């Protein structure tokens, strides 16, 4: 199969590594990719956010399947253009991608579908923000309504800080002021063909920059999968997945289909387990990062078959995907200054040594080859992924691999999945 993957981050690298692991002889291309992706796929000079350019390339190169990684091409309508020409594409069209592109749209869909979520007010002015903050009270939750690369939300006890966050985004459009929901968070992915869904394995990610969930919000500093502690509350992971499939994913997919905007691609449900039950924090319209890096390495079924079945509307008769008993932990290595102002262009050393640790592989997020060797080109640079038979083993492996990598001013968390081990 000839597959084109759009994107340049660790999520896309994880997808490509999963496709390569099938040993099915796929020809995998990536646009624009990065230095690490270039070792596992053929990089092509193509703007992933240009619907016409992507469609022409796919036609001229006989692409069998296009996989859209990040959110920007979805909101730009790349999937719509490809479908109009009959090219199988894994990723929702522009209208359905509003589930991620507009928090207000997502709240409306959840309300229409009867999906449990927190109260929210859409605010277009500072006065409306102030009124909503006063009504909902602290802790204050303020979200940019549109895309913000995973960093558009603030949760704070400080009203002034919440207002300042709103002020930063109001010039670009409305914000959402939401009810604070307390409890552990879970990420759960669903493959959708527009009518049916198939769940993957749950994961938990870490948004804050520093150990102990301190510091600013980021796009994600680490993750692990599976979540053994779900058994205590739900009787098992399968029971939890069944509940979310029944009460969240299926109603949302049915509602979008009924409104004439079928969702074909990856539905990411960001969930919180409150004392009042499971509630949705947000939806994304693509694989999550860094959760993809720990979910896909455990997947037993061929990823290409699942993605093509979803893109072709053929999920109905497929069984639920199976996952290995292994556990996976990933730690993100970020540049100095991330997330506010990452310092880039610094060399990376020890990458080969890190990848040589048993059970470890690297998913590149922001790397490039220079005359001086491998350099960091963005905020989140590498996802160091370790598989193991236990969380203790996986954490030890990922720790040794991260320690082998040199990046001046590099930042990473040391407590990813530590609570699971302690528990």
Image: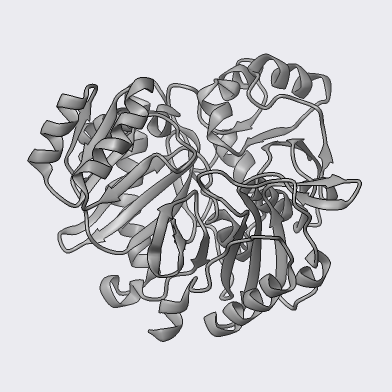
Q: Which of 241 and 171 is in front in this view?
A: 171
Residue 320 point in image, percent of width and height:
50, 57
Residue 139 point in image, percent of width and height:
19, 52
Vertical position of residue 1 compared to residue 127: above or below: below
Quarter of the picture containing the N terminus is top right
Residue appearing at x 47%, y 37% in the figure: 285
Residue 322 point in image, percent of width and height:
55, 63
Residue 3 point in image, percent of width and height:
75, 38
Q: Is residue 203 visible?
A: no
Residue appearing at x 57%, y 37% in the figure: 70
Q: Can residue 342 be seen in this view?
A: yes
Residue appearing at x 47%, y 73% in the figure: 417
410 sits left or right of 236 in the view: right
Quarter of the picture containing the C terminus is bottom left
Vertical position of residue 254 compared to residue 288: above or below: above
Q: Which of 366 and 372 is in front in this view?
A: 372
Residue appearing at x 11%, y 46% in the figure: 137
Vertical position of residue 318 compared to residue 135: above or below: below
Q: Nearer the viewer, residue 302 or 146?
A: 146
């Amino acid at each position: 199969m000839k597959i084109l993957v759009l994107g340049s981050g660790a999520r896309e690298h994880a997808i490509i590594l999963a496709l390569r692991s099938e040993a099915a002889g796929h020809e995998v291309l990536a646009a624009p990719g990065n230095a690490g992706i270039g070792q596992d796929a053929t990089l092509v000079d193509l703007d992933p956010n240009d619907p016409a350019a992507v469609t022409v390339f796919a036609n001229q190169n006989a692409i069998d399947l296009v996989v859209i990684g990040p959110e920007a091409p979805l909101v730009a309508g790349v999937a719509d253009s490809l479908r109009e020409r009959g090219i199988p594409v894994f990723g929702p069209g522009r209208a359905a991608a509003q589930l991620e592109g507009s928090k207000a749209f997502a709240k409306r869909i959840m309300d229409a579908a009867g999906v449990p979520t927190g109260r929210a007010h859409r605010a277009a002015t500072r006065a409306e923000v102030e009124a909503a903050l006063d009504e909902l009270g602290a802790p204050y939750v303020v979200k940019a309504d549109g895309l913000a690369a995973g960093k558009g939300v603030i949760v704070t006890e400080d009203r002034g800080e919440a207002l300042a966050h709103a002020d930063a985004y109001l010039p670009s459009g409305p914000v959402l002021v939401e009810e604070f929901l307390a409890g552990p968070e879970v990420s759960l992915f669903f493959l959708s063909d527009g009518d049916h869904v198939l769940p993957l394995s749950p994961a938990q990610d870490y948004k804050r920059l520093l150990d102990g969930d301190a510091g600013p919000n980021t796009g994600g500093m680490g993750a692990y999968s599976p979540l053994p502690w779900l058994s205590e509350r739900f009787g098992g992971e399968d029971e939890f997945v069944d509940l979310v499939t029944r009460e969240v994913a299926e109603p949302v997919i049915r509602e979008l289909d009924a409104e004439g905007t079928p969702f074909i691609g990856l539905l990411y449900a960001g969930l919180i387990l409150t004392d009042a039950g499971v509630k949705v924090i947000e939806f994304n319209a693509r694989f999550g990062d860094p959760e993809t890096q720990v979910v896909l390495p455990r997947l037993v079924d061929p990823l290409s078959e699942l993605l093509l079945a979803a893109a072709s509307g053929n999920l109905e008769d497929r069984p639920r995907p199976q996952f290995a008993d292994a556990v996976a932990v990933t730690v993100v290595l970020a540049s100095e200054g991330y997330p506010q102002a990452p310092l880039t262009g610094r060399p990376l050393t020890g990458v080969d040594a890190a990848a040589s640790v048993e059970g470890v592989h690297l998913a590149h997020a922001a790397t490039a080859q220079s005359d001086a060797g491998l350099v960091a080109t963005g905020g989140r640079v590498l996802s160091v992924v370790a598989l193991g038979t236990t969380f203790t083993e996986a954490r030890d492996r990922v720790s040794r691999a991260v320690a082998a990598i040199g990046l001046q001013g590099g930042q990473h968390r040391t407590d990813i999945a530590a609570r699971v081990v302690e528990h």
